[in-house]
Amino acid sequence: MAPMPITDAMFLLTERREQPMHVGGLELFKLPPGADANWVQSMYEDMIHSTDVSTLFRRRPHRPPSSMGAWSWELDDDIDLEHHIRHSALPRPGRVRELLALASRLHGTLLDRHRPLWEAHLIEGLQGKRFAVYTKIHHSLLDGVSALRLLENTLSSDPDDRNVGMPWSTKPKRHDPAPSRGLASLLGVPRAAWKTTSELAGLGPIAARAAFRSLTDQSSYLPSMAPKTMFNTPITGSRRYAAQSWPLDKIRAVAKASDTTINDVVLAMCSSALRKYLESLAALPDAPLVAMTPVSLRQAGAEVGGNAVGAILCNLATDVADPAARLAAVHDSMEDGKRSLRSMSPAQVTIASAVTMLPMLFSTVAGVRRVASPPYNVVISNIPGPTEPLYWNGAKLEGVYPLSIPMDGQALNITVTSYNGSMDFGLTGCRRTVPHLQRLLTYLDEGLTELQVATN
């Protein structure tokens, strides 16, 4: 097969035990009415005996001698579904706490590179007649937007539909998902910019310098340099995960009252939570934290798979005490970032899709973290998801909680998805470097309450 685009191969090149490079999802389902005690087991049996696996989920990484070390994909024609699909049960009492502990452990283990790079875990025993599905897939295969679209295309909006497969199947989509709301369409960037980035693989230092320039373009509205924080240190391979939902209507009301966007409010909630968290540990720097906010460059109707991601650097204004002023600063920073992307040529925007890989690349160079300040302190992603309730063979999907990638020097990742009137937050951190991760959920809730009061 052809060499991978550099934006995909980078996730393989930078992976090591301390830095697994897969993304994940934790989906909560309500058992369908009348389901007996064997319902989950029956679904598992159907899944492992299926022969319907799409090409995307048969790919495994390969470095043939003829490629001079470049990564490519080869197809596994004898895929072992019992390896990829696991059946688990939570220990009693089966609370969300036990589920998050299991997800933390599963997310910290590397995928086997001798096999297609994905796993799915069917988890029963959750209180409230519920079960969960934890999936993880290597970021070299697809980005977060593609993963969410796969889920949306697979499930059904009909609660009586009992013929629903899974994201790795080749069956046609059940319904038309919402149109793409990636930044590409919002900014009106020319369609030519979204062609494959494989041509960048041979550009070497030229591509790297151009990517740096796209970061530098945003420097006029950012602090002179992101401060070093407790998040910007070496990490271990062990993970801790926390998740919670907030009503989308509450966040939308704050955005409307403040003349900002929903994403601005999400970032301001995170800013407030990070400020309080660092204050509680006597670790809040005087300079404001900077967030890297990945943005989808994927056009509507584009083929699922691979990576089409750019970035905006956002001043989180964690040095500002007033919640309304902090939200205004976040909004201004994001607007400046969008204007910066609009000003780029198609080639520059394409190169900008590699910007998110740069910290991963430099984290592999010994000593860089000790002498250089981080380009940003934390990654915060917001991925639009399904707007209507969805079902898997009658089981109602209740929540979609993302798990993402802490990196060496970037120990915390916050990713948010919207689903059916809620905003589902997933916080993934290095277990050793980010203590008391659950506190951030409390601080996120307090941050939203402060914003509601400040904008009333």
Image (cartoon, grey):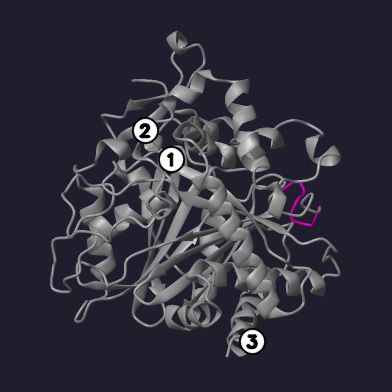
Q: CA distance from mark 1 to mark 2?
A: 11 Å
Circle 1 Cα neighbour tier, 10 Å, few/some/many (<14 / 14–19 / ≥20) = many
Q: CA distance from mark 3 to mark 1?
A: 38 Å
- Which circle marks residue 195 in the picture? 2
Q: Nearer the viewer, residue 451 or 285?
A: 451
The amino acid pointed to by label 3 is: Ala
Which SS type dominates the magenta stretch? loop
SS category of the residue bearing label 1: loop
The residue range painted magenta reads 228-235
Label 3 sits on residue: 454
The stretch drawn in magenta includes residue 230: yes
The amino acid pointed to by label 2 is: Lys
Is mark 2 in CB contact (under 8 Å) with mark 3?
no
Label 1 sits on residue: 307
Q: Nearer the viewer, residue 188 or 355?
A: 188
* 191 relative to 332, above or below: above
- In the visual, does 333 lie left or right of 282? left
- In the visual, does 83 lie left or right of 209? left
- In the visual, does 175 lie left or right of 97? left
